[in-house]
Image (spheres, helix red, strand yellow):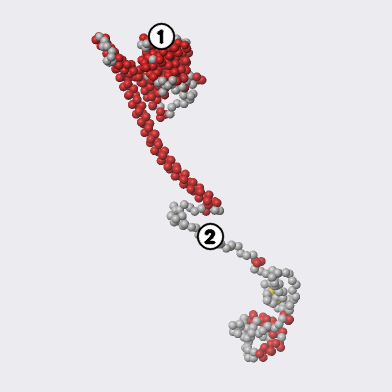
Amino acid sequence: MAYTDDAVKAKLSSLNETQESIVSVAQWIMFHRRHADRTCAIWLERMRETTVNKRLTLIYLANEVVQQSKARKKDDFLVAFSPVIAEASATAYKGATNDVQEKIRRTVEVWNQRRIFDKPIQEAVEGRIMELDKSRSGKKTGLLGGSLFSGGGSNAPAPAELQPLIPLQTAISKANATSSPALSTANTEYDKLTDADKPTPSPPVYAARLSALLKTLSSAETAVAESIKTRQDLINGLEDLVATNRASLEKEQSQLTTTTERREFIEKKKREVEDAIMSGKSATETPSPATDGTPHANGRTTSSAEPERPQVEALTPPPTESLTPIHSPKFTANQNPLTNTNILNGDINQPLQHPPTGPTPQPTTSTPVYLDNLPPPQSTPSDPRYGASSSSDARYSASSPTKKRKLDAEFEGFGAGEDAMAGLDDDVAELLRAESGGVV
């Protein structure tokens, strides 16, 4: 059967819901794929004119044609159906029963999963169907309580920055769905009417065709102008979004630079502290960052190297035992430490205890030594620097008159005619006279 508009309409009228009928008509349509635009236009007209129950069959026919074309990598009908599929799907969905609507939704979901149409066309189809669902009193939900066109079951809303762009994109999809078929029809009618190979019809018929073509071109022009206006609005919104993101990008780049510098500084500081710990110093002894003589906030300056601390001598005095020999004799207040005699009582016969000498202070028994056994002391000449002779000399002279006479002979004229007690206090002179027995 040759391809004509009537042949296409006859094929569509004989279509039923059986698989054999759908596959047979689809094969015939695909055979005449060079007339894809005209076939899709007639298919859309049939969708608008037929009953509600017949529209589901036309959706199944379009589904068979586009899937076979996709599998065979023939894009003729994919391109031809793209401008009209959104409007046709909405027409078939509107007013249908819940069962028919569920089948249409399932078909649209298959198109989405298999990427039959481009993303804008697919979004336009889903948008038209969801708008019809919202306009109904009882909103229809998809499978498992979610939207059938949620893109993988996620119902998360779009970001706030993209919310103003969603209506614009939806409007563009609607404008494309309207302008594309109108423009395709206008181009087809224009080619037929201006074809030089075809004979020119009679003037009345020719005038009527020109008038119809003028209306078609005007409709296509209006649809395209509306699509351009909507797309320009979308571009302006996208430019604003790009400008906002560009400003945010510059700010984030500056923040990244600052953060990187701070991280590198902290890493350097961490290495310095770790090196100080490894070298045996504490974190508080590590040199401060300003070590080149720069002033601190408190006005002090730091040098490049800290001087060594001086050695401090302990303040605790040595024990008394280290200065006093062991077993030293203890004397009372009235006892002469040299002669071990009681000065007040005149006791000269008490033994004198000598402290032990030697490297090892061991306790020893001292032999008493009396003054009578000691060698006589050597006398010293009278010297004004020394004053009178000591009491020990007087005592010695009293106990040994012979020695005294010998000394007088050796030092003749020494102290002759002079009082030995001259220049002394009366108490001291009296004490010396008592000890010497009145000799002096």
What residue did someone put label 1 on? 13
Q: Give the side of residue 278 with respect to residue 218, left or right.
A: right
* SS under mark 2: loop
Q: Nearer the viewer, mark 2 or mark 1?
A: 1
The residue type indicated by label 1 comes to Ser
Q: Give the side of residue 366 with respect to residue 290, left or right.
A: right
Picture coordinates of residue 415 (x, y %)?
A: 63, 88
Q: What residue appears at the point 70 percent right and 72 percent down from the top-left corner?
A: 358
Label whose residue precedes the other's in the sequence (2 or 1): 1
Closest to the observer: 200 or 316? 200
What residue did someone put label 2 on? 309
Picture coordinates of residue 330 (x, y %)?
A: 69, 71
Picture coordinates of residue 52 (x, y %)?
A: 42, 10
The residue type indicated by label 2 comes to Arg
Q: How far apart are labels 2 and 1 at the CA level? A: 111 Å
Closest to the observer: 306 or 20? 20
Q: Residues within 10 Å of mark 2 (few under 14, many from 20)?
A: few
